Image (cartoon, helix red, strand yellow):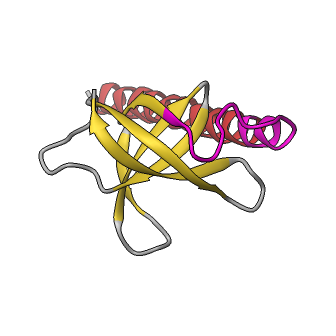
Amino acid sequence: MEQLYIAAGGAGLLVLLLFFLVVLRRRSSDVAASKRAHEEAQDREPPVEIGEQYEFAITEFTDHHSGEQVAVGKVEGFVLFAGDVPSGAGEGDVVRARVDSFNRGRTSADATVVSTA
């Protein structure tokens, strides 16, 4: 009976080890994909222009370096951080925002929500 417990424990440990290997591999794969996307963004012209308005779905909310919470969305894979989001707006809602400025590397832009779509 004791050998059965040892075998079961060893099998459980093996399953746990395999689980962690899969999780770690996926995490490193996500990090590598994010890094590649960032590098590609640095090599292309932004698909948006300052002063123009674009519609996008809010993918998340985050704290901006300005200290305010902003909506995050993408236009052709290009990240916009939009302030002045109407109260009650949530992830998945579509907004129209005016592009105000680019970051230093022109890999993202700050925008202001002008309406909900």
Q: Looking at the picture, how far across and down is residue 35, in whole percent?
A: 73, 43
Compared with residue 84, is residue 65 higher up or lower down, i.e. above or below?
below
- Relative placement, left or right, of 79 versus 93 is right
Residue located 73% across and 42% down the image: 38
- Relative placement, left or right, of 99 versus 72 is right
Q: Image quarter for residue 94?
A: top left
Residue located 81% across and 35% down the image: 40
Q: Image quarter for residue 43?
A: top right
Q: Check the image and name the residue furthest to the front.
A: 51
Residue located 40% across and 75% down the image: 67
Q: Looking at the picture, how far across and down is residue 12, in whole percent?
A: 38, 30
State which region is magenta. 37-53
Q: Looking at the picture, how far across and down is residue 6, in whole percent?
A: 38, 34
In what quadrant of the picture does the N terminus appear? Answer: top left
Q: Check the image and name the residue furthest to the bottom.
A: 67
In what quadrant of the picture does the C terminus appear? Answer: top left
Q: Check the image and name the residue furthest to the left.
A: 88
Relative to the observer, which residue lies in front, 51 or 13? 51
Count of labels shown? 0
Compared with residue 52, is residue 22 higher up or lower down, i.e. above or below?
above
Q: Looking at the picture, how far across and down is residue 11, in whole percent?
A: 43, 26
Compared with residue 35, is residue 8 higher up or lower down, i.e. above or below?
above
Relative to the observer, which residue lies in front, 109 or 36? 109
Residue located 12% across and 45% down the image: 88
